Structure formats: C-alpha cells, structure tokens
Image: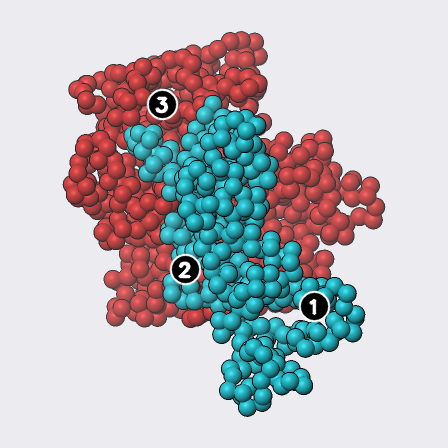
C-alpha cells in the first residue's frame, strides 16, 4: 500500500517551519524552508552546525521527538503530505520508501545484534519476506556496498567492524528496500579522508544504480560539489540560497554563501598573499535572531532600515534555472568585485633550528592477555622519525587516524618517553624526560592546542582563572595582580574581550573556547606549539578566524608551529613544510610546494585526490583507495602502504612486499619513502589542476 | 573462557581464605572465648579455670595455628591429660597408640565443620539443612521479584516521563524505601492479623518448612521481594530510558520497526546489561534480608541459624555459616560475569 504512482517531485518541502518547545519559550529551528527533490536528483543541504539542516531531515522522517513540532508549511513525499499520515502509514514508508544514513555509524547500529539480523529486519517488515529470502537480499546488498567477505560480515557484531565498514553497513541497511529517497546526514564526518572518498564514490554509484533521489546534508562544500546536482545553503534556520551546483558555486547571489566560500582555504589561497576572510561575529542563537535578515549583523552589504525592516522572502534569480536567494540587494551587489584584500603580510623567514628529531621511535608493548601477559605484541606507533623545525616555521604533520601523529605529539610533550632516537630542543635531549621531570621552562616552551575545545576547559572554573592557573604553573609573574594583568594581555592577544575573564566556559562558543585554549598555550611564551587538529571541531566560518589568529601570533612571537591535521586544504594554506605520515612512517617530507606537486609518494597522491575541493574549476584525478588502513598492531610486511598502493605493480620483483623502502632524497630537502624509480616518479601527473577560466 | 573461569575460581578461593580468616579472628577474640568457656562450663568459673578450660580445648594456641587446624592444613590439636590424650579429631581420652590410628587432620578441607554448641550437633548437616530451606525461600523470592521488577522497569523506562513512568516509579521508590522489618510487620498486620481482619495468609512460616503453601509462604516471600524489586526496577528503568534515547533505537524507528518490536527486539537486551549485575548482586544481599524475614516469620533457615549462632556464641557454626555465605556471594558473582559476557557481545574474555 505504501507504493503509489506519482510523476512529480519525490520530495516537496513547502514553506516548512519547525519549532522546539521548551518550558521557557518556543525555539524556531527551521523557518520558511522550501526545497524540491526531483526523481534521481541529489540535493545538498549545506550550513554550519545549528543552522537546522538535521532538523529538516528529521522533519521529513516525522521524527522530531516530544518537543519538536511542525508549525507551518508541508512536507510532501510523492505528492502526499507526510504530516497528515497516521503512525502506521508513516511506519510503512520509513525504511522502505525513505531511508536515512546517519553521521555516527557506530552509534546507529545496535551493539547487541548481529549485522545480518539488523539488515534482514528491513525487508521482513516491509515486504514480508521470509528469513531465507531476507538473508539472500542482505547478502546481495552487502556485496553491492563492496564489503569483502560478506558472509563473515553478516555474522559479526558492529563492534567487530571498522568505522568505514560500519558506515557501509548503514548504507546497505538504507538500501535494503530500494527506497525512492535517501537522506544522508553528514554520512562521512566520522571517517578518514581516504575512507570518506571511497564511501562517497559508493553512494554516488549506488544512487545511479538504484535511481534513488538523495538529500545530502553536510557542512563540507567540497563534498556537496562532488555528490550533488543541486544545493541549498542554510543559515540560522532559513534557506538563504538555492540552485544548481554551477549557479551557486560560480554565480553566488547571497552574501553568506560568498562569505562561506571566502573563508575556506581553496587552492590558490595563501596565508601571506591571499589570506582567508573570516566571517565577523558569531552565529545568532535561535532565540536571539535579529529582525529582518538573519545574516544582517555579519554582512558586509548590510543596509540599515532595509535589511532589518522585516522578513525577507526568497527571490528568483532571473536567467538561471530554479536559482533563488534570500537577499534584498542581490541585484545591486557587484558579485564579481575582487575580494577586498585583507591585510597582506610579508613572508617570514624561518630562523635557526629549534627542534630536531633524530630517528625517533616509539613502540608500545601490548599484552595479548591482560592478566597473564601471553604473547606480547609490539605496536610500532612511530618508526624512525627525523626532521628539523625552525623558529617561526609552520610544519604540518598530515595523516589519517592511526598514522602515529598523536603519539609523536605525546612523546614531544613528554606524556610518553621515546623508545629510541632523540629529540633535541635547543640541543638538549628531552626524549626520555617525562613531563613531570621537565623543568618549568621546558614545559612552558613546548605547549599544545587541543582538538576539542569543548572538553579541554575545566567547566567549573572561570576562563581567567584557568589562564592564571597556567601562569602560576609556568612561574610567570610575582604577584596575583601581575598574573591577572598578564592574563588580560593574553586575552587581548587572542582577541577576546577582557570581560571574558570572569565567564564560565559554557558561556563561550566553540571558537571562543579554542581561543582560550590558545591563550593558555601561549601563557608561558611557548616557543613550540603543537596544534593537534585545532580547528577541525569548529565550524567553517570560525575556522578561518582561529587559523588567522594562530598565524598572527606566530608572526609576532616567532613561534614554531607543529600543525597536526588531516585536512590538506588548510595544510596547503598555512604550512611552510609538510610531513606526510602513514602507519608510523614518514612517507614524504618537503616544502608545501614540493609535497603538493608531483612527484608524489603514492599515498600523498591518493590523499590529495581524496580531499573534496569546493571549486568547480578544479579538475581532480580520481584515485580511490581500496580497503581500510591496516591496523598498527598488525602492519603489512615491507612497505606499509603496499596493501592499498596503485603503483605497486610498477615495482619489479615484489620489492614492496619484502622491504621497507629507504628514504630517498629528491633534492632541496624533499624526501620520499618509496621503491618507485626516478622515471616513474617523474611520470606522475598533478592530481589537482585548476582549469583556466 | 575456561581459563577465565579457572582464574576467577582462583581469585575466589583467595577471597574466601581472607574473609574466613577475618571472621575467625573476630570470633576468636579472648572475650568471646571467655564467654564460650563460661557457657560451656559454668558462669561462676574463676579466671584460672577459664584459662585451663581454654588450654584443654586448644583455644589458647596462636591464631594462625588454630586457623590452620580449622582449615585442616595443620594437624589437629591434641592435649595430654591424666586420662590419656584428648584431641580435636576424636572423642574421649585415648592412649598414644590409639591416637596414632586416628586421623591427624580434621578441618573444613576434610569435611569436618566442627560441632555446634547451640544445636548440640555436627555443623555440616545443620548448615546443609538450613541452607536448603533458605534456598526454597530464595527461589520463590527470585521467581516473584525478578520478572515483576523487570516488567516494571521496562514499562516505566520505555516512555520516560510519561504517566505510566511516574506511577510505576513511585511504586518502586516506595517499596525500596521500606525496610523489611517495616513492610513485614505491616503485611502481617494487614493480611494475617485480626487488626484489619483480612486474615488471608498465615503470620508465621514455620509450617512452610515441611509443607510450603501459598497461604503460609507468600508473606515472607513478598516481604523480601518487595524491597529488592523496587531497586531492580529503578535500575532497569534508568537503563531502559537511556537505551531508548540511543541512536540505534532511532535507526530502528526510522527503519519502520513498530514500537513493541523496538522494545522487545532492539532495546531489551541492551537495557538488561546493567541491571543483570544488580540482580546477581541481590543474591548475597538476599542473605541479609533473609536474616530479618526468617526471624520475623520464624522460618528456621540459614538467616535464622546465623542469628542463633551469633547470639549463642556458637563459634564453629558461625564460621561455617560465614564460609557458606562467602561462597554463595562469590559464585553468584562468577555467574554474573559469565552472563554479562553472554549479554554484551562487546566484552569478550579470551
């Protein structure tokens, strides 16, 4: 009964408004939102966290929880209003007609149920298949999502699979009943870049194969460019711009879209010559939205008395296909005006060597059995790490999870001691001094900015107090007043208002918290700062501002910045030199230009190809790696990358499987760990080409 | 798995040794021994007479030696008197040759639990008999308590904050906040006395020792079950409520699974992982409740024996009771760990 014939759009959301009701007030989460998804079409929904994109998805599923309610407009699925359906009707549609893929695969699979059972349930409920037929279907679909050894996978529990495999299972579950509409809610956010690329590829292929329409929710513009036909940009509960990918990416008609594009590091951006333009101000809270245009207070083109006068409807952009914008002034603004050059800076020259690593090794011994020991396994987290870092230089350390970049940071900080090799800080060995034995000066010199600003501040201590605490530990200032004065200066340094000293961390936004984290790291005039994915937990518009801040402090204080990241776009933007790691090995090391241009190490090549770039002019070579990253507990013999390398067949004699490649110098400090011959390396083509306009 | 159980058994033995030693030490404090001598002899014994009695019975030896003898790893105590040799392992006074024929070790390990001064009988059979009586009581308690507690908890937890939840939670909190000696007395007053006049059940469970019937056995069972039920129901509710907000429940809901099936197939197993440990913890705790309820209803089981042994300074019986209690506690914990592994596939012991 759930299938009926309908020719129009699969999904038609018309002037939808959703509110959440709390005891205090009604909080509008989505306002006046309209979008249409045609059969076979993929529509991207883009926006920062809190803009209401996930609420739209749950609204379509009619699963808003106790507090959420649709207060206006309608959601029509194949011409029928979902809001008017009974619970029973909805249940027959969910899972069979509309399916959803979730952000965290681990959390969305039942931990106490075998994969087979979770998959088979879908056709058994909706099509009344018996167990045998359902199992056959499950086997087919699991093969379709390219999982190795489907029968074994079906027999496992979710925790026995890797993150990428789990996400494939969630995709398989969504496809079990061949739905007409697939909603993907940030499906790859929890995955590594190369795994993400493979999953995106899979979703695209399957969409074509099954003819499924897709609503793709993401904060990543590059990902949407790669997967979708149309895009809808959301800001603070409203759709601000809607249109085809080409129209929106190349002829954007809303100031927010423009600002968003200017704040992400596209190829060509440069920290000195063409710095990113951060969006000023903060995202408004749902109950503190300004009158008129929500983006008004942060907009460069804001016109008082007009933009804040009243609600702004969507205007059609003449000449383009179904392209609409929520901006009163879209026809007055010169969209092609060059970016007002933000302050340009001279390139700073790196000074003398501050930090030197020589053949650093860190092995962990892992007992197979917690009580009796049993066979000890050695995990080689870092294998012969050698590099130098100079004063006021930014060295980026790039790699996916499990590559040993965090272990390296721990050893440098003194949270762990090295197994072998040496770390020289100003020619003093510190590799075997744990942090509790380091003198205050050394501790203050080497500091860290952490990935997640939400968890690294003490929730029950004011911001000022936490910074003063760091000052006390570093022995800065004689009296309480001196330290307080220094703390206020630090707040100035990270561009936070001085009133923030008395605030609690919960009153701060993510970006502001990260600024506090930076202030704390620089409390003792740190000379080396390890920034472990400092912006990856932040929204795009805030990322630019925090990155900028780090760069500025670095210029002033001549800090050495070790920037750990998996995001190659931002690495290309801000680093002077790049070190690429894979399974504990440094596979490539060189200046940013050297690493981002051929010859590449095969892994660097794949990594570059995997990063989605939000620019329609960019042509990328398409390299998709098979399989997952091998476990560090059980690394492959020979070259660590050989299991996934597409160049392996070019090396004669199966050398890749036998020997770990030596470090090869390619001149000017560019080094690569690979068996490929010089001619083969020379034959490599650039992965990213910017098409001439 | 086999190794895991072996290891747990090893740990268990070690714990049992430590615990029994503590009990042994406490019951063998001098004032206790003095009291024992006076109850066994006469209350007007002089201090010298007490000492000589205790020396004769072997109580004046160093504590570790006595503990070893009680365990059966040190040869039994012997004492030479004018009549011959008396000893722990045999009755009466014998000659040296006769003693040589007797067994030398007689402790727990040899199955010799000692002699109860209160019941004038061997400790072993007493404990066996009392334990089986309490076993029957516990069985019915569990049968009543666990299913009703789980049903209560699941019903309350599946829609957190609903009217059902609030009503059931109130019941659970009330029952668990009422100790047995209160609920027992109230139940007797309401259902077994002429105060209210219902007189549906009997106020004493003495008859249930031979012939348990609904009439004479229901009140003690209910009294213990009520208290534990509220506790387990609260745990189940909390765990259920948490599971119901989990993302995989949303996945199931958006797969089109109906609400009853979500609860039964997806939530239940995950929700039972936490309360399972609590339920198993109830076993040792039941021994506690049993002490009060058995005394209250005059049901001569294990708890009642414990009370009798303690109040009559019956050292060997008390020790026997404590050994059994320790093993009951440890074995239930072992079962709980194994069951936990079965319920939760993420934990594996290999």
A173 shown above or below A329: below
Q: State which mark lies toward you, 1 or 2.
A: 1
Task: Report the disc number at residue A669.
Answer: none
Give left or right: position of A276 versus B51: left
Q: Which residue is mark 3?
A: A62
Give left or right: position of A590 versus A245: right
Quarter of the picture containing the N terminus of chain A is top left
Q: Which residue is mark 1?
A: B41
Query: Do the residues at discs 3 and 2 belong to one chain?
Result: no
Q: Chain of mark 2?
A: B
A285 shown above or below B213: above
The reply to whether callout 3 and callout 1 are in contact (CB within 8 Å) is no
Q: Position of residue B196 (x, y in %)?
A: 54, 26
Residue at image location 34% in from the left, 16% down from the top: A83
In the rendering, what colour is chain B?
Answer: cyan
Q: Which residue is mark 2?
A: B349
Q: Nearer the viewer, residue A159 or B202?
A: B202
| Image chain in red | A
């Amino acid at each position: 009964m759930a299938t009926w014939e309908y020719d129009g759009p699969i999904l038609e959301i018309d002037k939808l408004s959703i509110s959440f009701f709390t005891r205090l007030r009604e909080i509008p989460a989505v306002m006046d939102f309209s979008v249409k998804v045609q059969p076979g079409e993929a529509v991207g929904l883009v926006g920062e966290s809190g803009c209401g994109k996930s609420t739209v998805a749950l609204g379509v599923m009619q699963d808003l929880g106790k507090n959420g309610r649709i207060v206006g407009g309608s959601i029509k699925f194949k011409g029928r209003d979902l809001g008017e359906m009974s619970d029973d009707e909805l249940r027959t549609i969910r899972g069979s007609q509309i399916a959803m893929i979730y952000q965290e695969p681990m959390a969305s699979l039942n931990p106490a149920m075998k994969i087979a059972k979770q998959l088979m349930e879908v056709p058994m409920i909706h099509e009344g298949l018996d167990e045998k037929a359902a199992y056959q279907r499950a086997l087919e679909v699991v093969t379709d999502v390219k999982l190795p050894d489907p029968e074994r996978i079906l027999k496992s529990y979710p925790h026995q699979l890797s993150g990428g495999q789990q996400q494939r299972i969630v995709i398989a579950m969504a496809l079990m009943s061949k739905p007409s509409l697939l909603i993907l809610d940030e499906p790859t956010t929890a995955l590594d870049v190369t795994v993400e690329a493979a999953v995106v590829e899979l979703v695209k292929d399957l969409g074509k194969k099954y003819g499924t329409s897709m609503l793709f929710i993401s904060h990543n513009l590059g990902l949407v460019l790669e997967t979708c036909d149309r895009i809808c940009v959301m800001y603070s509960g409203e759709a601000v711009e809607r249109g085809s990918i080409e129209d929106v990416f190349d002829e954007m008609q809303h100031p927010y879209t423009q600002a968003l594009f200017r704040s992400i590091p596209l190829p060509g951006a440069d920290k000195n010559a063409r710095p990113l333009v951060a969006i000023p101000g903060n995202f408004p809270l749902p109950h503190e939205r300004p009158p008129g245009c929500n983006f008004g207070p942060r907009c460069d083109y804001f016109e008082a008395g007009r933009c804040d006068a009243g609600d702004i409807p969507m205007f059609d952009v003449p000449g383009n296909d179904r392209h609409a914008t929520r901006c009163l002034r879209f026809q007055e603004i010169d969209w092609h005006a060059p970016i007002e050059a933000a302050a340009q800076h001279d390139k700073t020259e790196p000074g003398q060597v501050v930090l030197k690593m020589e053949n650093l090794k860190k092995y962990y011994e892992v007992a197979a059995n917690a009580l009796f020991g049993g066979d000890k396994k050695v995990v080689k987290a870092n294998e012969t790490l050698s590099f130098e870092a100079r004063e006021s230089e930014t060295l980026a350390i790039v790699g996916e999870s499990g590559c040993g970049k965090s272990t390296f940071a721990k050893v440098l900080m003194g949270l762990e001691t090295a197994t072998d090799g040496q770390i020289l800080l100003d020619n003093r060995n510190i590799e075997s001094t744990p942090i509790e034995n380091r003198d205050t000066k050394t501790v203050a010199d080497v500091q860290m900015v952490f990935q997640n600003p939400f968890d690294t501040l003490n929730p029950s201590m004011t911001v000022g107090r936490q910074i003063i605490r760091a000052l006390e530990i570093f022995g800065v200032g004689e009296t309480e007043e001196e330290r307080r004065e220094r703390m206020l200066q630090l707040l100035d340094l990270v561009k936070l208002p001085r009133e923030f000293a008395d605030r609690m961390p919960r009153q701060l936004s993510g970006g502001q918290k990260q600024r506090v984290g930076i202030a704390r790291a620089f409390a003792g005039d740190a000379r080396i700062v390890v920034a472990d994915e400092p912006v990856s937990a932040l929204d795009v518009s805030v990322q630019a501002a925090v990155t900028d801040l780090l760069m500025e402090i670095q210029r002033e204080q001549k800090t050495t910045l070790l920037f750990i990241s998996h995001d190659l776009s931002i690495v290309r933007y801000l680093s002077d030199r790049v070190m690429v790691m894979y399974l504990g090995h440094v596979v490539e090391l060189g200046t940013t230009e050297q690493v981002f241009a051929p010859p590449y190490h095969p892994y660097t090549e794949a990594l570059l190809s995997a990063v989605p770039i939000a620019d329609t002019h960019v042509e990328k070579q398409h390299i998709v790696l098979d399989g997952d990253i091998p476990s560090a507990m059980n690394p492959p013999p020979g070259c660590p990358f050989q299991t996934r390398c597409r160049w392996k067949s070019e090396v004669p004699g199966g050398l890749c499987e036998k020997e770990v490649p030596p470090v090869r110098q390619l001149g000017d400090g560019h080094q690569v760990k690979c068996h490929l011959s010089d001619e083969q390396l020379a034959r490599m083509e650039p992965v990213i080409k910017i098409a001439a306009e | 798995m086999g190794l895991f159980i072996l290891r747990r058994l090893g740990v268990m033995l070690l714990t049992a040794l430590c615990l029994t030693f503590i009990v042994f030490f406490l019951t063998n404090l001098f004032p206790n021994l003095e009291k024992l001598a006076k109850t066994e002899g006469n209350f007007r014994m002089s201090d010298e007479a007490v000492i000589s009695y205790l020396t004769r019975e072997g109580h004046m030896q160093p504590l570790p030696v006595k503990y070893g003898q009680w365990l059966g790893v040190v040869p039994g105590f012997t004492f030479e008197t004018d009549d011959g040799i008396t000893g722990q392992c045999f009755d009466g006074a014998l000659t040296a040759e006769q003693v040589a024929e007797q067994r030398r070790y007689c402790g727990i390990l040899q199955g010799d639990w000692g002699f109860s001064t209160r019941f004038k009988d061997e400790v072993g059979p007493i404990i066996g008999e009392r334990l089986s009586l309490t076993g029957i009581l516990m069985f019915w308690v569990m049968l009543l308590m666990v299913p009703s507690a789980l049903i209560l908890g699941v019903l309350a937890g599946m829609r957190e904050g609903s009217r059902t939840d609030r009503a059931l939670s109130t019941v659970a909190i009330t029952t668990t906040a009422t100790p047995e000696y209160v609920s027992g007395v109230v139940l007797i007053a309401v259902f077994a006395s002429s105060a209210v006049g219902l007189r549906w059940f009997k106020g004493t469970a003495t008859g249930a020792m031979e012939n348990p019937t609904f009439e004479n056995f229901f009140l003690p069972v209910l009294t213990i079950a009520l208290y534990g039920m509220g506790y387990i129901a609260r745990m189940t509710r909390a765990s259920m409520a948490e599971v119901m907000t989990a993302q995989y429940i949303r996945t199931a809901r958006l797969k089109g699974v109906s609400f009853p099936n979500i609860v039964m197939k997806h939530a239940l197993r995950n929700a039972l992982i936490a309360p399972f440990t609590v339920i198993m913890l109830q076993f040792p705790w039941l021994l506690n409740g049993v002490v009060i309820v058995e005394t209250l209803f005059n049901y001569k089981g294990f708890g009642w024996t414990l009370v009798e042994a303690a109040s009559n300074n019956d050292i060997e019986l008390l020790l026997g009771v404590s050994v059994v209690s320790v093993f009951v506690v440890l074995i239930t914990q072992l079962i709980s760990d194994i069951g936990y592994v079965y319920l939760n596939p993420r934990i594996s012991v290999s």
